[in-house]
Image (cartoon, rainbow, N blue to C red):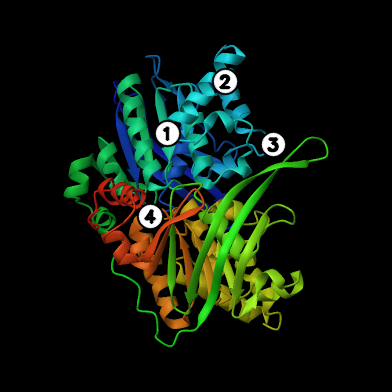
Amino acid sequence: MADATALLSIRDLTVEFSLPDGPLRAVDGLSLDVGRGEVVGLVGESGSGKSVTALSVLRLLEGVARYPSGRIEWRAEGRPVDMLQLPEPRLRAIRGAEIGMVFQEPMTSLNPLHTIGRQLAEAIRLHRVATAADVRREVVEWLERVGLPEAHRRLDAWPHELSGGERQRVMIAMALINRPALLIADEPTTALDVTIQAQIVELVARLRAELGMAVLWITHDLGLLRRLADRIAVMYQGRKVEEGPADRILTSPQHPYTQRLVNALPAGGPAPVPPEAREVIAVEGLRVEFPVRRGLLRREVGAVRALAGLSLRLAEGESVGLVGESGSGKTTVALALLRLWARGMVRQTGAVVYQGRDLGALSRAELRGLRREMQIVFQDPFASLNPRMTVGQIVGEGLAVHEPALSSAERERRVGESLAALGLEAAHAHRYPHEFSGGQRQRIALARALVLRPRLVVLDEPTSALDVSLQAEIVNLLRAIQRERRVAFLLISHDLRVVRALCHRVIVLRRGEVVEQGPTAEVLSAPRSAYTRALIAAAFDYRAVEGPAA
């Protein structure tokens, strides 16, 4: 029986997807309640059914999934209604007004053809009557509340002009702007730096107190739930295996799977850099500006400085971490090093020398020949994977381009090895990106980069979409690959636990400028700048895990 006092009651929910080799049961007999004003954490590793559950509440899998059994009862206005049986007009009225949702991948959730100001304004106008001035004021207010810098100047920005963390903040503002009775947050902070994560958690806690808002928070970050959740439910392979008060789950887990999740944190550090290691890449005085163009003829009227004078060196078997808040220039460094800009998009100055060759002096054809040795794993795996290609084609594409002499059987074997090394099955090669969870898609992106056995890999938030148990596995895998192949890593991350486990040196960026750099242990244990101290405090104190003193 459903709890008659709960705001949301899920009872015996089963969700299936039809696949060529038979039905896939993603959720199997799930029952879960969310009370009014309560925060319930839903945790489990990638592919456990968390996101499918969330999408089913708002019936966003219509036409894709089947529901052999179950009810999803909603009681915002007293009398319960079954979300699975509601007519479409009533369902649309609930979405965004009574139930808000933050999706896992903001770039695929925001409309690329509309500015962020217009998209937030639309969320208001769909459910309320308000003047243009009131709408604009409220949009700016909510962008400021979620920590978007200079919110009043960003209303005309397009989604592609924002960093991954900034896009996620826009999505959070859009979900909260109508003050819903229930917020469903599907990994809402994975793309955010730790200081903004702390702000978002505080914001949600404040809104819960002010509005009596309930929250279903889906995450793989148990440290985050320590401060936020009243109850935690743990899912494994589509089933709920444990549920209870947050303190009890985090301190005395009963199920072996929950115990593994609680105890899984990246540990240790990278192997020493071999003394005879040769330099792989050297960067001197790297500067990047984005021209600002206006008018019909798109004349340049100014420029936005994204990076100011960065220098770094990377040797074989060495890892350097780039840390800093969203928008600090971390991803700009990655794109500048690999020269992935569209022509005319930026002004880039400074030297980038790879294996003794100045990349700025190479032709497109010469640069293309080096792509095999320089790979990148992007922050948003869904946006970087071709939806029309199978996983096998995606991972094997680089082999087809750079090793055309390989036979089909050999290429298939290499693809299978790369997938297996990242915890995926050989059968996954025949499926498409949309059939996987966010964490599984990130593993596919890693497999695509590593299958070519490159000398330099830029890792842009490679573990942000992964559950904690897999984070530790990926960290160990990357360390093993680095030892065996002497590959150099440039790691971009807001997770200082991962930086500590993988990186020999760390560079701290803020608004495009280097504020501190040095050996990782030294920077994390004795930071010199107030900004670095704030990052460390947010990363370790907020997550309630053992870490270096700030």
The reply to whether callout 3 and callout 4 are in contact (CB within 8 Å) is no
The quarter of the rendered structure image containing the N terminus is: top left
Pointer 4 residue? 495
Residue at mark 1: 184
Amino acid tagged 4: Asp
Residue name at image x 37 percent, y 66 percent: 518
Question: Residue 393, located in which quarter of the rendered image?
Answer: bottom right
User: Rounded to the nearest whole Å, what is the CA distance between mark 2 and mark 3?
Assistant: 19 Å
Number of on-image labels: 4
* Pointer 1 or 4: first along the chain: 1
In the depicted structure, whether residue 183 falls above or below residue 219? above
Per the model, the C-alpha gap separating discs 1 and 3 is 25 Å
Between residue 348 and residue 2, name the one nearer to us.
Answer: 348
Q: Residue at horizontal 63%, vertical 27%?
A: 118
The span from disc 2 to disc 4 (Cα, nearest Å) is: 34 Å
Q: Secondary structure at mark 1?
A: strand
Q: Is residue 206 left or right of residue 86?
A: left
Query: For mark 2, what is the residue?
Result: 136
Residue under numbered circle 3: 113
Judged from the image, the secondary structure of the residue bearing numbered disc 2 is helix
